[in-house]
Amino acid sequence: MTKDEAVARLTDIIAKFVDYTGKVLPDDVKKKLRELGDQEDTPLAMAIYEAMFKNQELARQLNRPSCQDTGAIQFLLKCGAKFPYLGELESILREAVIQATKNAPLRHNSVETFDEYNTGKNIGKGIPTIFWDIVPDSDQLEINTYMAGGGCSLPGKAMVLMPGEGYEGVTRFVMDIMTSYGLNACPPLLVGVGIGTSVETAALLSKKALMRPLGTHNPNERAAAMEKLLEEGINQIGLGPQGLTGKNSVLGVHIENTARHPSVIGVAVNVGCWSHRRGHIVFDRELHYTIDSHTGVEL
């Protein structure tokens, strides 16, 4: 396979995967939605979950996105330093988004800031957003794809706390956002919390937290305990499905953290809606791929 052929193949696979993830939710999200739906006992909450399941069924049958807002496309990469197409990857991802936008089709969601015009291709300055992690001594490419919709992006917030506010301050920050904007983000929500030194490090950690499979926990036992406490606390707010009340408000709470400066606690929240359109695909150097977020995928 020539380099041009390899670039075309990689572009085609990623475009089809982005297309697919806009129509079919990850296995863990579908399983969790069914679990939460079974716990509801009020007619309204039960009806909303049934509508969600019907939505997913029709999206697959009609080959159409499961939500009209197909988001701004984001890619979180772990790319091996020895992956043979590292230098072409940014242009490959942009072209894949253009193809997926046409073929899916995806709503045109890239508006150039200040110039105020829609590009019509879901690409623009910094869109698709690409977050890079370069992995030494690896020739693999690992991609998390994500559709960042307007509603689920709305609660996003980051700030730096005084150290004396402690983890109680982190909890207050998260709960304030959930009680202010959680209603607008199409619950039940996946809540990603990032904790580090500065706003940008915390914000990126909170987005990476949304890429973790549901049911996983922070490896630090104190952080994992905080995930559980926040999940219980947000559920007690009673947002329920679509914010119309119910027993459960979240799919889960994920915390990602780094070490921090002793004088500050940087904290951020990013939120995924019930239609959490995340995908995970891994390529080897020969462009054979494995998808573990969705079973039975045919690209």
Image (cartoon, rainbow, N blue to C red):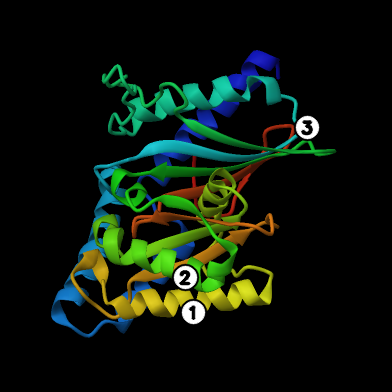
Residue 208 location, x and y as percent? 56, 51
Say if 18 sits above or below 188 in the image: above
**Image location of residue 211, percent across then percent down:** 53, 53
The vertical placement of 65 against 7, above or below, is below
Taking the spot 41% from the left edge, 51% from the top edge, the residue there is: 157
- Distance, label 1 to label 2, CA atoms, is 9 Å
> Between residues 18 and 145, which one lies in front from this camera angle?
145
Whether residue 31 is visible here, answered yes or no, is no
Q: CA distance from mark 1 to mark 3?
A: 39 Å
Q: Would you place residue 62 above or below residue 190 in this image?
A: above
The residue pinned by badge 3 equals 81
Sequence-earlier tag: 1 or 3 = 3
What is the three-letter code of the residue carrying label 3?
Ala
Mark sitting earlier along the chain (1/2): 2
Element assignment for label 1: helix
Mark 1 residue type: Leu
Give the residue type at disc 2: Thr
Q: Residues within 10 Å of mark 3 (few under 14, many from 20)?
A: some
Which label is found at residue 113? none
Of tags 1 and 3, which is closer to the observer?
1
Residue positioned 35% across, 61% down in the render = 177
Q: What is the secondary structure assignment of the residue under circle 3?
A: loop
Residue 17 lies left or right of residue 86; in this view the side is left
Instruction: Kindly identify which numbered label has been placed on residue 171.
Output: 2
Closest to the observer: 76 or 27? 76
The answer to whether the residue labelled 3 contacts the one labelled 2, judged by CB atoms less than 8 Å apart, is no
Specify which label sits upstream in the sequence, 3 or 2: 3
